Image: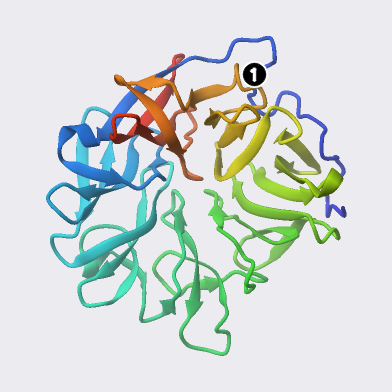
């Protein structure tokens, strides 16, 4: 593997940077807050990819019991409807985004057939970018300045490849080197730095220049779904072919001149799902399946001490059966985790895990 601007090796652990529990220490316990569930009778189902801001408010999409969909923000005490399909909006697709200070962005289709990214319920006032400029829309993320980053195809001009764009409602800026069929889900921090990957490379861009921060010459080594915090640390998953052609996966941190493996399928884990998140304290959360077949949300390499919650745990009177869901924006700077869970009684909900130290 060739590392650009990196001197650390995969497999070397950080010391003092990421707040991971030790093998013998006790994990910080969590209490749990219900944001919304289907037992209330108002909701039929939820999108499994909630976002959270630094005050603990959780953003999610719900299918409504009376028909249609809505986007909501709740903190466990109050619940506010941001937008719904009773007016101009026809449906909400993909994951809604919320910044650490509560800025919103979501994708929707209008009754007129137009589609695009919006900040709120008024199509005329709250449109950020729409189908008069783009097609093939992807997921969107937003930072504290209201700047959004997304993947789409530009309708006009010579470049008609699907690529990553940056903007705040004005003229969108094309991210250099992002016009590639393998360009994945992007991330943006509050400094306006955009992280993205293309197969065997990881990039960081300010919208004008793009820098490769890691790459490999191994055709069987892939990076995907990087997320970046305000300190410029990038968390990204990797997949490579190991012994006996076994696919080995890792979650690694790229920080300055270091690339470090945080967790891997060489240890207690069998599989990582696509979503993981990092906050500005260097804490991470990810969803994984253990070698035992158990599924859960974790903050580090030790399943017992670094567990947030697992399938089989009881939550608000019902056991979790499967599909614990998070997004790349499910962890805030207080260490709170927003997640989706499905229960054995057929109900499902959106919840928040709160470190007991709060």
Q: Is residue 73 visible?
A: yes
Identified at 69% across, 64% down, the residue is 210
Identified at 66% across, 22% down, the residue is 302
- The residue closer to the viewer here, 314 or 58, is 314
Residue 83 screen position, x and y as percent: 21, 54
Q: Quadrant of the C terminus?
A: top left
Identified at 36% across, 81% down, the residue is 132
Establish if 348 lies above or below 150: above
Give the structural element (helix, strand or loop) at label 1: loop
Identified at 86% across, 44% down, the residue is 243
Q: Which residue is mark 1?
A: 21
Residue 56 screen position, x and y as percent: 37, 32
- The residue closer to the viewer here, 317 or 108, is 317
Q: Report how many numbered discs are placed on residues in the image.
A: 1
Q: Is residue 56 visible?
A: no
- The residue closer to the viewer here, 211 or 277, is 277
Establish if 92 lies above or below 24: below
Mark 1, other Cα within 10 Å: few <14 / some 14–19 / many ≥20: some
Residue 181 screen position, x and y as percent: 62, 72
Q: Is residue 195 left or right of residue 240?
A: left
């Amino acid at each position: 593997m060739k590392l650009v601007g990196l001197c650390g090796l995969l497999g070397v652990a950080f010391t003092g940077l990421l707040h991971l529990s030790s093998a013998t220490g006790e994990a910080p316990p969590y209490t749990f807050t219900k944001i919304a569930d289907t037992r209330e009778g108002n909701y039929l189902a939820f999108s499994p990819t909630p976002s959270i801001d630094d005050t603990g408010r959780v953003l999610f999409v719900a299918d409504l019991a009376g028909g249609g969909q809505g986007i909501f923000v709740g903190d466990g005490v109050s619940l506010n409807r941001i937008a719904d399909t009773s007016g101009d909006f026809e449906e909400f697709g993909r994951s809604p985004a919320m910044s650490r200070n509560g800025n919103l962005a979501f994708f929707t289709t209008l009754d007129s057939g137009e589609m695009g990214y919006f900040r709120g319920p008024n199509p005329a006032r709250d449109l950020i970018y729409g189908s008069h400029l783009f097609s093939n829309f992807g997921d969107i993320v937003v930072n504290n300045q209201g700047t959004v980053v997304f993947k789409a195809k530009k309708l006009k001009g010579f470049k008609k490849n699907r690529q990553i764009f940056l903007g705040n409602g004005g003229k969108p800026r094309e991210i250099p080197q992002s016009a590639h069929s393998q360009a994945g889900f992007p991330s943006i921090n509050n400094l306006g730095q955009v992280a993205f990957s293309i197969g065997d490379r990881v990039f960081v861009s300010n919208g004008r220049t793009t820098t490769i921060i890691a790459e490999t010459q191994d055709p069987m080594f892939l990076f995907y779904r990087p997320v970046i915090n305000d300190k410029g640390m990038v968390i990204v998953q990797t997949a490579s072919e190991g012994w006996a052609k076994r696919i080995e996966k890792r979650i690694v941190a790229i920080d300055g001149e270091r690339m470090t493996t945080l967790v891997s399928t060489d240890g207690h884990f069998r599989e990582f799902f696509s979503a993981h998140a990092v906050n500005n304290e260097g804490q991470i959360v990810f969803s994984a399946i253990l070698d035992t077949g158990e599924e859960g949300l974790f903050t580090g390499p030790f399943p017992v001490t670094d567990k947030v919650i697992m399938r089989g745990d009881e939550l608000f009177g019902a056991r979790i059966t499967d599909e614990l869901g998070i997004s790349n924006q499910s962890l805030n700077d207080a260490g709170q985790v927003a997640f989706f869970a499905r229960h054995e009684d057929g109900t499902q909900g959106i919840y928040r895990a709160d470190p007991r130290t709060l």
